[in-house]
Amino acid sequence: MSEMLGNRYLLELRFEEAIPHFESRLRREPADRRTAQKLALCHALSGHRDAAVRWVRRALEASVEESLPEEVIWRELVAAIRSRAGELGPTRSALGLALARLFRDPAEASGTLEHAMEDAPDVVWLRDVLLAFERRLEASDDTTL
């Protein structure tokens, strides 16, 4: 299994096929935040809600300390989602774009939440995860004052 092949499947929007490659990478490198982000997105867009919640939380927790995203992957993924939005449907494309935005800039959790809820109001689980993350960011800001 290869992370590069997982990235290829991700950019081709073949989320189910990307999952085992990212899981394999995380077994070897459990602290790899970038792969956790990609796995979260794949599970979310494959309809695996519980796994998506688990991986989104893990990716966001790690993102507070380490905030260097894989710009090229996320930029290409956004372009792929936008170009195939009709195929993905409004909920999946809105969710994919919201997660890509969130993982590029975790400090923008509230903006991502608003965007996702406008375009995909039935993705309530994402709202819950983002609100918890936003509270954590606010608490960390309060302790640094």
Image: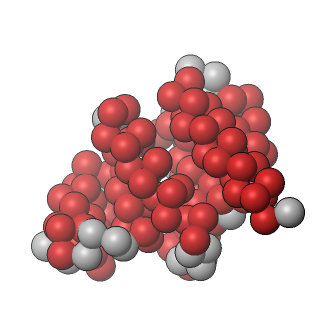
| Residue 45 in the image, given as x and y percentages of width and height | 41, 42
Q: Quarter of the image containing the N terminus?
A: bottom left
| Residue 98 in the image, given as x and y percentages of width and height | 62, 47
From this viewpoint, is residue 51 visible? yes
Looking at the image, which residue sits at the far left?
A: 1
Q: Relative to 43, does residue 118 appear above or below in the rendering?
A: above
Colour logic: secondary structure
Res 119 quadrant in image: top right
- Tally the numbered discs: 0
Q: Relative to 67, does residue 20 appear above or below in the rendering?
A: above
| Residue 33 in the image, given as x and y percentages of width and height | 43, 69
In the figure, is residue 105 to the left or right of 15? Answer: right
Q: Nearer the viewer, residue 37 or 120?
A: 37
In the figure, is residue 129 to the left or right of 6? Answer: right
Residue positioned 71% across, 49% down in the render: 139
Q: Relative to 119, does residue 96 appear above or below in the rendering?
A: below
In the figure, is residue 46 to the left or right of 68? Answer: left
| Residue 115 in the image, given as x and y percentages of width and height | 73, 39
Residue positioned 38% across, 50% down in the render: 55
From this viewpoint, is residue 8 visible? no
Q: Quarter of the image containing the C terminus?
A: bottom right
Residue positioned 51% across, 73% down in the render: 73
Looking at the image, which residue sits at the far right?
A: 145
Residue positioned 55% across, 37% down in the render: 129
Res 3 quadrant in image: bottom left
Res 19 quadrant in image: bottom left
